[in-house]
Amino acid sequence: MHDFSTNPQFQQLKDKRILVTGGAGFIGSNLCEALLGLGAKVVCLDNFATGHRHNIEEFLSKDNFTLIEGDIRDLETCQKACKDIDFVLHEAALGSVPRSINDPITSNEVNVSGFLNMLVAARDNGVKRFIYAASSSTYGDSEKLPKIEDEIGKPLSPYAITKYVNELYADIFHKAYGLDTIGLRYFNVFGRRQDPNGAYAAVIPLFVKQLMNHESPVINGDGSYSRDFTYIDNVILMNLLCLTTENQEALNQVYNTAAGERTTLLELVELLKKYLAEYDPKIKDLEIKFGPNRKGDVPHSLASIEKANKHLNYKPIFSFQVGIVQTTASYSTFFK
């Protein structure tokens, strides 16, 4: 992980009480780790539906870390978690477009009703700032590239609808109740602690798992679909900037959280083969297979990060290529 303590702006988080919902998940646990390193008092709320205890095991013995096991669908749990909290980083959600197509009701309960519970609890407990995980899926059927925050299309999945509704609720809670919010539209985040298992694993850990098992990776479509793959440390940086900015114009906005560069799925797999082959040479010769396009998938995704740069002074600290090298290195322990 990048050493964020070298940035004097982030030192103001020392002793601040910060709630991370979904703190045992991939992004949430990385945020917890960065905040603990900055001396913040971190409260993690997770029901372990998709998060894992091993992600936060090393934090449990720390005096400035508290785990609350609970579900954001329960308002009382949210109220308890928000007590005496300065800032909320809301990462808890049921991700995955295919999951939402297979089970739209549960996705809505967690991503909309759970989100509303957290907004209510934050309002009731006087939370200073509520920063939440939005999604690039909100751009829907808009074909314009790069994606600009105020130009979106129609959603292509129930998941995309839930994440857009989050943005609408956050806006209303600022206007009606004065709660300061910031939404971060994450673009295909990847990196250490990303779960390669389960039916809804994200594309990069899924490809890594297949390659490590000497299975041919299966690309949905012809490989020409492209994504703005964003390394986890860029996402941590954006969250820390949102927590600490003193620019009032930066608040109550939605920002693309991305690297600002586009990579096709075929290019991605070729790079994964190249770097994983350094640990296992057999991977280099594995054949790539192609399957049907997935329902609800957006063909191309590329973010404009101009707004984040203007209001938050955001500049990605890791390119996609460097992130892939670090990510494959984090999986290298499995080869020993």
Image (tube, grey):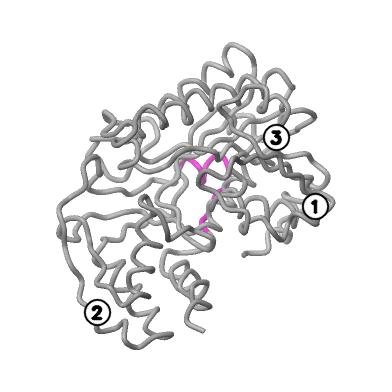
The amino acid type found where label 1 is placed reads Gly
Does the magenta portion include 123? no
Which of the pair 275/281 is nearer the observer?
Answer: 281
Is 210 placed left or right of 106 in the picture? Answer: left
**Amino acid type indicated by mark 2:** Leu
First to last magenta residue range = 307-316
Q: Examine the image and state in which quarter residue 125 appears.
A: top right
**95 horizontally vs 65: left or right:** left
- Neighbor class of circle 1 (other Cα within 10 Å; few <14, some 14-19, many 20+) is some
* In front: label 2 or label 3: 2
- Residue that protrudes farthest toward the top in the picture: 176
| Dominant SS type (magenta) | helix
Which residue is tagged 3? 87
Say whether residue 309 is magenta.
Answer: yes
**Residue 39, labelled with which disc?**
1
Q: Position of residue 140 (x, y in %)?
A: 28, 35
Residue 148: x %, y % from top left: 36, 38
Task: Give the residue drawn at x 66%, y 55%.
Answer: 56
Mark closer to the chain start, 1 or 3: 1
Provide the secondary structure element on which disc 2 rests.
loop
Label 2 – label 3 distance at C-alpha: 47 Å
What element does badge 1 sit on? loop
Give the numbered dot on residue 286: 2
Q: Label 3's element?
A: strand
